[in-house]
Image (cartoon, rainbow, N blue to C red):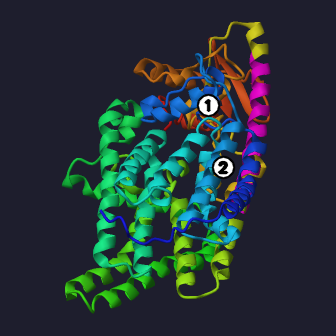
């Protein structure tokens, strides 16, 4: 592998590095503060804060388990250490920004900070930062995935350390590998920008591919074989050519999800900027191809011309990365770690091109600043919606606990059965209308649509009653259907503005809205979500 391939990394002075870190940390506070202010246990946090289980090993994330145990000198159960975990997460991201500034010789601390800001500020990463137990490990995964490209030397020792770093990244959070893939393509663009000889940068590309491939192979052999349960189902890969249409469907689903996460006006504002960022690598590639065709065979020039247009598309596909070859990938904001890496890589290309072509870096700063403002706006809206939803559902759950206590005093109660959904708090519903992504980011806990979350949430308020929907065996499913059918003929025992209560033997049917009334009128007596399987979150 090449040891002397020129890059942009001239070590930034220590003072400049500290400046980048401080600026980035301040910027990340704008993203993190709305989440901390909302102070809501996020999905898996509900159960971890209550019973302290880890559960990451079965998800293929053993280093996350080790990190969390070390942080609290683990005895037998985890405790909530927030906001330490989330503050640590943004500190790790800020340090990654310092390494980016050094590697690509971005001299202005403000430009460097704004260029690296999307790594952890992009809207999909808001979900990662919302986890009180997972945020730090996810950011560690991001840093380690980028480490071979932004900090380690391009020599034999650096190559092996890079394999180790990527392997460790996978053991923290698998989706971070996509950030590494995008920065590998970034190296190609920068090599073309600086006119690096074709053979040298292709050898470097092959070396990077070897690093990633070896790390993923070792991970699969040592860790992947121990993944089980729901995560194993989601990690199942296509088996042959007959499954190739699955990849097409995954591409449509992933990028349809991304496209549908923002309304038309946001795309009108930001699409021109994103198109500009996508065209820069094309222009660099075409310019390089014209130069190379003079000294290489015609087919080499033709290949480079084609690659110039394919490279931005390849980078876009790397946002989902290996998840595209899964049979049933998990399409959630938290797995789109690569979106921030793609934006940061595009901004790095822009500032490097402006410097190479002797243009003012203010254009790069303006574009990065525009994107940063949009990210901060979404983060603030999301944090407000998260807080409103928390208060809304806590009020309902507290009232429900009191009502069930009163009913229990009149006769023994054994179980409860949720029916329908509490929906969004009015302010949160308004945010969802304007920011479609918030629908995926703000979960509704009082809902039959997510048995896992509703069960864990109500453990805080009514721990003495069994959850009829938490069992998924056929007998339990039949019992749920029978209770709902019988509830149609049972009078209302308690009615509030949020729910109604009906008693069927020793089970309380908790109905949100008019779901049960509509089904009883239809004569079905069954509910969506009856017998829903319980996922173990990634």
Residue drawn at point x = 61 percent, y = 20 percent: 51
Left or right: 398 with respect to 52? right
Q: Is residue 175 above or below residue 447?
A: below
* SS state under label 2: helix
Outermost residue, bottom side: 294
Magenta residues, start to end: 377-404
Residue 338 picture location, percent across and down: 49, 58
Is 284 in front, or is 158? 158
Q: Are marks 1 and 2 in contact (CB under 8 Å)?
A: no
Residue 330 in view, yes or no: no
**Residue 462 or 384: which is nearer the viewer?**
384
- The residue that appears at 54% across and 88% down in the rendered structure is 357
205 lies above or below 30: below
Q: Nearer the viewer, residue 189 or 17?
A: 17
Q: Position of residue 162 (x, y in %)?
A: 40, 51
Between the C-alphas of marks 1 and 2, the distance is 29 Å
User: Residue 213 vs residue 320: left or right?
Assistant: left
Q: Main secondary structure of the magenta part?
A: helix
**Residue 493 vertical position relative to residue 441 in the rendered view, above or below:** above
What residue is disc 1 on? 454
In the rendered image, which residue does mark 2 sit on? 90
Q: Secondary structure at mark 1?
A: helix
Q: Nearer the viewer, mark 1 or mark 2?
A: 2
């Amino acid at each position: 592998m090449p040891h002397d391939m020129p890059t942009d990394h001239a070590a930034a002075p220590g003072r400049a590095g500290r400046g980048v870190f401080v600026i980035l940390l301040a910027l990340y506070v704008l993203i993190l503060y709305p989440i901390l202010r909302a102070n809501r246990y996020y999905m898996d946090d509900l159960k971890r804060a209550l019973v302290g289980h880890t559960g990451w090993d079965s998800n293929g994330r053993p280093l996350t388990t080790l990190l969390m145990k070390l942080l609290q000198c683990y005895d037998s159960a985890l405790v909530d250490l927030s906001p330490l975990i989330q503050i640590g997460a943004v500190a790790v991201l800020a340090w990654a920004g310092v390494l980016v500034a050094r590697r690509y010789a971005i001299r202005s601390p403000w430009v460097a900070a704004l260029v690296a800001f999307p790594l952890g500020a992009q809207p999909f990463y808001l979900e990662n930062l919302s986890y009180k137990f997972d945020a730090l490990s996810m950011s560690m995964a991001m840093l380690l995935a980028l480490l071979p490209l932004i900090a380690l030397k391009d020599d034999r020792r650096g190559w092996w350390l890079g394999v180790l770093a990527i392997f460790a990244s996978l053991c923290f959070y698998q989706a971070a590998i996509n950030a590494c893939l995008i920065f590998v393509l970034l190296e190609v663009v920068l090599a073309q920008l600086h006119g690096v000889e074709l053979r040298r940068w292709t050898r470097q590309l092959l070396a990077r591919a070897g690093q990633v491939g070896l790390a993923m192979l070792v991970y699969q052999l040592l860790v992947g074989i121990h993944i089980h349960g729901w995560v194993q189902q989601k990690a199942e890969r296509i088996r042959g050519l007959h499954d190739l249409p699955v990849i097409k469907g995954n591409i449509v689903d992933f990028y349809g999800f991304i496209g549908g996460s923002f309304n038309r006006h946001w795309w009108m504002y930001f699409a021109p900027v994103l198109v500009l960022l996508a065209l820069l690598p094309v222009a660099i590639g075409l310019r390089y191809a014209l130069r190379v065709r003079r000294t290489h065979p015609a087919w080499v020039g033709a290949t480079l011309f084609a690659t110039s247009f394919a490279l931005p598309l390849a980078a876009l596909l790397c946002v989902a990365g290996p998840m595209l070859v899964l049979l049933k990938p998990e399409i959630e904001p938290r797995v789109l770690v690569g979106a921030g890496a793609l934006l940061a890589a595009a901004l790095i290309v822009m500032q490097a091109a402006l410097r190479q072509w002797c243009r003012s870096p203010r254009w790069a700063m303006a574009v990065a600043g525009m994107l940063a403002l949009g990210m901060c706006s979404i983060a603030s809206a999301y944090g407000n919606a998260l807080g409103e939803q928390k208060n809304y559902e806590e009020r309902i759950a507290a009232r429900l606990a009191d009502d069930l206590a009163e009913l229990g005093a009149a006769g023994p109660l054994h179980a409860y059965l949720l029916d329908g959904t509490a929906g969004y708090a009015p302010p949160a519903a308004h945010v969802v209308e304007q920011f479609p992504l918030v629908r995926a980011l703000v979960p509704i806990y009082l809902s039959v649509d997510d048995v896992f979350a509703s069960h864990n949430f109500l453990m805080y308020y009514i721990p003495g009653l069994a959850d009829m929907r938490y069992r998924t065996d056929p007998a339990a499913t039949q019992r749920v259907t029978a209770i709902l059918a019988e509830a149609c003929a049972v009078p209302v025992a308690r009615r509030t503005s949020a729910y109604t209560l009906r008693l069927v033997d020793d089970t309380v049917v908790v109905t949100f809205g008019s779901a049960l009334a509509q089904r009883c009128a239809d004569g079905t007596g069954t509910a969506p979500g009856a017998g829903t399987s319980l996922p173990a979150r990634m």
